[in-house]
Image (cartoon, helix red, strand yellow):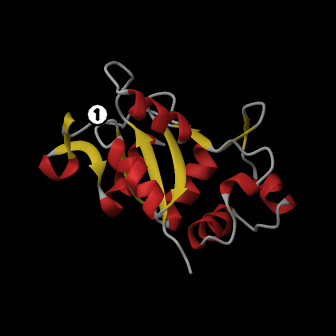
């Protein structure tokens, strides 16, 4: 069974969060704005994301976008860039090969030694198009945005 891979980006900061929201953000390792994590699409994760939908945006990431995020924003311990040499040591030919393995569920991001599971992104080039207080389907930026997450990720890398 192949699970999809979701990219989760924290958009809003910390004030006025309920304790369960703070706990969920900590479990997902989303401590700061514009941090992104990759999680497998399971019912448990969907429940966690529903709990924090007014703080994050998320959706299904594709291979090309994930490869670009890994190449530009992937970091090893010590804030060293993720390099092709490291990928070859791990048995991958290039960033696309690693991205497809992650999306297909052949490997988890935690299985890669020294790779940080959090991607620190820039604010989007050109700014956000919608409100930071509304859901994506209401003209805002928060919540589930399906494959449109790829456009936002490209603006933020």
Residue at x 47% of width, y 63% of height: 41
Q: Position of residue 76 (x, y in %)?
A: 74, 40
Tell which of 2 and 47 is nearer to you.
47
- Would residue 78 be found to the left or right of residue 133 on screen? right
Residue 37 sits above or below residue 106 on the image: above
Q: Position of residue 2 (x, y in %)?
A: 55, 77
Q: Is residue 154 visible?
A: no
Furthest-front residue in this view:
19
Q: In the rendered image, which quarter contains the N terminus? A: bottom right
Tell which of 59 and 16 is nearer to you.
16
- Would residue 33 be found to the left or right of residue 135 on screen? right
Residue that label 1 marks: 127
Residue 128 sits above or below residue 19 on the image: below
- Mark 1 is surrounded, within 10 Å at the Cα level, by few (under 14), some (14 to 19) or many (20 or more) other residues, namely few
- Would residue 60 be found to the left or right of residue 99 on screen? left
Quadrant assignment, res 100 = bottom right
Q: Position of residue 125 (x, y in %)?
A: 35, 37
Residue at x 43% of width, y 63% of height: 43
Residue at x 83% of width, y 54% of height: 85
Q: Secondary structure at mark 1?
A: loop
Q: Position of residue 11 (x, y in %)?
A: 36, 34
Residue at x 72% of width, y 32% of height: 79
Furthest-right residue in this view:
89
Q: Is residue 120 visible?
A: yes
């Amino acid at each position: 069974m192949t699970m999809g891979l979701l990219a989760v980006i924290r958009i809003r900061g910390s004030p006025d969060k309920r304790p369960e929201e703070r706990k969920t953000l900590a479990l997902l390792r989303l401590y700061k704005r514009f941090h992104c994590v990759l999680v497998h699409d399971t019912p448990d994760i969907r429940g966690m994301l529903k709990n924090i939908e007014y703080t994050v945006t998320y959706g299904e990431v594709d291979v090309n976008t994930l490869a670009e995020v890994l190449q530009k924003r992937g970091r090893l311990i010590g804030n060293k860039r993720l390099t092709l040499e490291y990928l070859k040591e791990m048995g991958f030919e290039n960033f696309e090969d690693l991205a497809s393995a992650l999306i297909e569920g052949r490997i988890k991001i935690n299985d890669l030694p020294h790779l940080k599971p959090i991607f620190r992104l820039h604010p989007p080039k050109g700014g956000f198009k919608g409100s930071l207080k509304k859901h994506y389907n209401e003209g805002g930026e928060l919540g589930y945005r399906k494959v449109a997450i790829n456009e936002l990720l490209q603006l933020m890398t």
